[in-house]
Amino acid sequence: MTLAFLGTRGAIDERNRRHRMHAALMVGYRRGRVMIDCGTDWRTRLPRLAPPAIVLTHAHPDHAGGLVDGAPCPVYATQTTWGIIDGMPIAQRRTLRPRQPVAIGGITFEAFAVVHSDRCPAVGYRITAGRVAIFYVPDVVYVPDRGEALDGVDVYVGDGATPARSFVRRRGGRLMGHTPVRTQLTWCQTEGVPRAIITHCGQRIVAGDERRLGAQVRRWGRRRGVEARIAYDGLEVTLR
């Protein structure tokens, strides 16, 4: 399996040469390729990128806003996400149901409901191909079925909105926002995930001292027995 980090920027105004584009991942296996998420930054670039398929985690603009003019390929999303982006002229709509694995281009996607936003409910994806499994969740407060989602996972690709300070808040009795990177690495430790890559980077990373923060993320990982790093636009990772 190959992971190509097309973009690594979250829903922030700041950007730099390492984090220019909204977070999106191209997953490849043999001849198959699937793009995960297509935020507003990708709107004019999507025809040239020409992914064979797109899978959405949720309907926020930095994850689905690039589809306002339609898509050149099938788009997969949950029924909830389709209800929110119903006005987008997407011709080839495919509905994913939580906890029902679906093969797309030889790569299997299983959606797990996660807590992130009450207005735009999100999922993370357990993705498997060959002997490799990853879990991709760019926006998350917590994963209710975390043990099953991360069971046997080789790499956790998680939410970089905030390194250490919690961005979790409560609205109408419901939690929403982003859990810190440090906490997500503890999840990896608890579930035995050996490697973590942080994407969907927030202001602290993009506008701050990324070298220092990157070193801090690696230290947090080492203390938990997890190899951890921050992703950047253009990073490519091969997993076997």
Image (tube, rainbow, N blue to C red):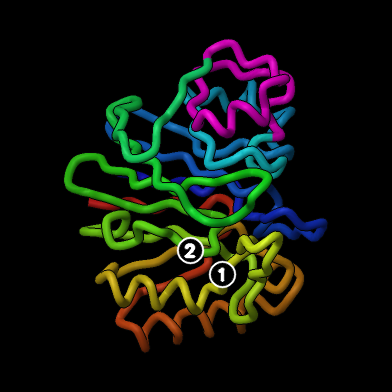
Indicate whether residue 125 is drawn in magenta. no
The picture places residue 2, in percent across and down from the top left corner, at 35, 45
The picture places residue 54, in percent across and down from the top left corner, at 51, 29
Comparing 47 with 165, the one in front is: 165
Instruction: Using the image, determine if residue 228 lies above or below residue 118.
Output: below
Instruction: Using the image, determine if residue 119 lies above or below residue 217.
Output: above
Q: Tell me, for residue 179, which label it has, or none.
A: 1
191 with respect to 37 (left or right): left
Comparing 234 with 163, the one in front is: 163
Query: Label 2 vs label 1: CA separation?
Result: 7 Å
Furthest toward the front, the residue is 173
Indicate whether residue 68 is drawn in magenta. yes
Which quadrant is the N terminus positioned in? top left
Q: Amino acid at mark 1?
A: Thr
The picture places residue 92, in percent across and down from the top left corner, at 53, 13
118 with respect to 221 (left or right): right
Furthest toward the top, the residue is 91
* Quarter residue 188 falls in: bottom left
Label 1 CA crowd tier, 10 Å (few <14, some 14–19, many 20+): many
Q: Amino acid at mark 2?
A: Tyr
Q: Are marks 2 and 1 in contact (CB under 8 Å)?
A: yes
User: What residue is pinned by disc 2?
Assistant: 142
240 with respect to 38 (left or right): left
The picture places residue 129, in percent across and down from the top left corner, at 25, 40
Range drawn in magenta? 65-92
Residue 31 appears in the figure: no
Between disc 2 and disc 1, whose residue precedes? 2
